[in-house]
Image: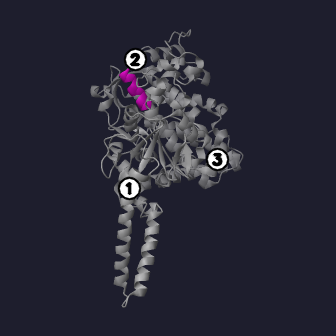
Amino acid sequence: MPPAIPTITIGSGLGATIIMLNAEKSSRILAVEAFVVLWTLQFTAWGIWYMFIYPFFVSPLRKLPTPGGWHLGTGHAVKAIGKGIGVSAREWISKTANDGFIRIYGPFHREYLIVTSPQALAEILVSKAYDFEKPQFIRDFFGPFLGHGLVLAEGQDHKVQRRNLMPAFAFRHIKDLYPLFWRKACDVVQVMTDECNADGYAELDVDHWAGRVSLDIIGVAGLGRDFDATHNENDEIVKTYMIIATPTMGDRILLTLTDFLTCFLPISVLLKAPLPRAVEAQRAAKKIRNVCKDLIRLKKQKLADSKLEDVDILSIALRSGIFGEEELINHLMTFLGAGHETTASALSFAIYAMCRHPEVQTRLRHEVRANLPSTADAQSITSMDIDRLPYLAAVCSEVLRVYSPVPQTIREAVRDTTVLGQPLPKGTRLLLAAWGTNLDTSLWGPDGGEFKPERWLVRGAEDGLGGTAENVKAASIGGASSNYAFLSFLHGPRSCIGQSFAKAEFACLLAAWVGKFEFELCDKNMMDESNITFEQLITVKAAGGMHVRARVVPGY
């Protein structure tokens, strides 16, 4: 809550009290009238200062470059909500000359800074990482659905949680999950194949199938429970979770309004408002929390009986003896949200990229079929089988660059600080826009806006894949001028703890899908990306789904 609102309220109350004490005839009506008048006058004066004087004449950020096209009162918010901040940031970064920051206006002309330079990103994400936190309204808004786990934790709480969870995400554990990833990938491929007609064709919504298989994987690998969404999309828990996992335009509007309305009402009141979407999401979140609680208690009993031998993340966390039940529930909610939605988004846009670039799809299929067993076989694979495929790794990296599942992240200065010498007062909000920075031609070169897996491969290498990077080091960052040009997993102490898990899962799923099917878009207008409306909240999806025509390619 901005300090001005309680200050105005307290000041108005004191003023009304003074008027009452000095009035010849005091009454409740006089007290109320005095309070309302004083509150209105002060609020109006503060509003004029906040909207028109401070951002344009006083703010230390006022001289930073600001894109045009903003509107009085709403600033750039109409465009950001309509297109999504990530998509809008691509345009602003490409068209606005800057030295590390671009200023945009939110509702009521609140200033936000889009961070663009590697040097500024390094300070915010690494050297001064704990000077910046997610705004409180973000944590309060998403807390009931994501859990107050690692993603939403801040400060010392975040440091402790991350340290305690690191063993569950160690690579020695992740590599043991590759067979599970592959088995689930083959499973969903078989079910999708069964959807095909006699000629081997089917029209599929990629979002739908990606969501089902990624929920199954995070269920088994994270919680030790197979939701079996691949085979049973009508299961109550599956349907319940999909309610939370489907962002809408209304969600973005509600999130924006929440930031403003929390000036006057507690977030708990707003989240319990009798809005159909809010009621539906709250009910769904409560069901999922109960499922998590039941799983924890079941595994606790197995642990007490010395029978807990599972290798899922929950079991590892329980064996550590560090976490209480409520902490574990929050972590499981976070694993479900972060682990399910991000992979589903990445896989959907990977198939979209394959449709737009059929030559990449064909080349990837050849590599997969030459090195991995058929999805129709019962044969398992190891981490080495996947990790030795250079073109698969390059395609996955390029998808994550161009279509980062999390298009933007917001931070707020929790104290007066500076970045690149630029004063940032406490409360300054920063946008780390992966969808903009990941394609910034000043960092990636003239072809930064193009989908080119070759940028992740070494030029002249014996693999003959046509790499464009000068050497192995350059290939590891896609030929960019800095590793901070790639923001899909962030960097520093707030980087994604599940990065290795996500990359391995994504690679197995994409290999299995492209190895079996040839994909093309049902709506050819979507070949032009500008014809797509993106639904963005935490992750990003194509509005209306990603509908493709899949054909079983014989010989595998």
- Disc 2 is placed on an element classified as loop
Using the image, tell me which numbered label, if any, was put on residue 553. Answer: 2
Q: Is residue 49 left or right of residue 148?
A: left
Using the numbered discs, state the Cα–Cα distance from disc 3 to disc 2 in whole angstroms.
Answer: 48 Å
Using the image, tell me which numbered label, if any, was put on residue 127. Answer: none
- Residue topped by disc 1: 53
Amino acid of disc 3: Lys
- What residue occupies the far bottom of the structure in this picture? 24
User: Is residue 253 placed above or below 26 in the rendered structure?
Assistant: above
Assign the magenta stretch its main secondary structure: helix
Q: Is residue 310 visible?
A: no
**Residue beneath the point at 53% across and 25% down:** 481
- Locate residue 117, reporting x and y percent: 50, 34
- Residue topped by disc 3: 159
Mark 3 or 1 closer to N-term? 1
Amino acid of disc 1: Ile
Amino acid of disc 2: Val
- Disc 3 is placed on an element classified as helix
Which residues fall within the magenta stretch? Answer: 347-359
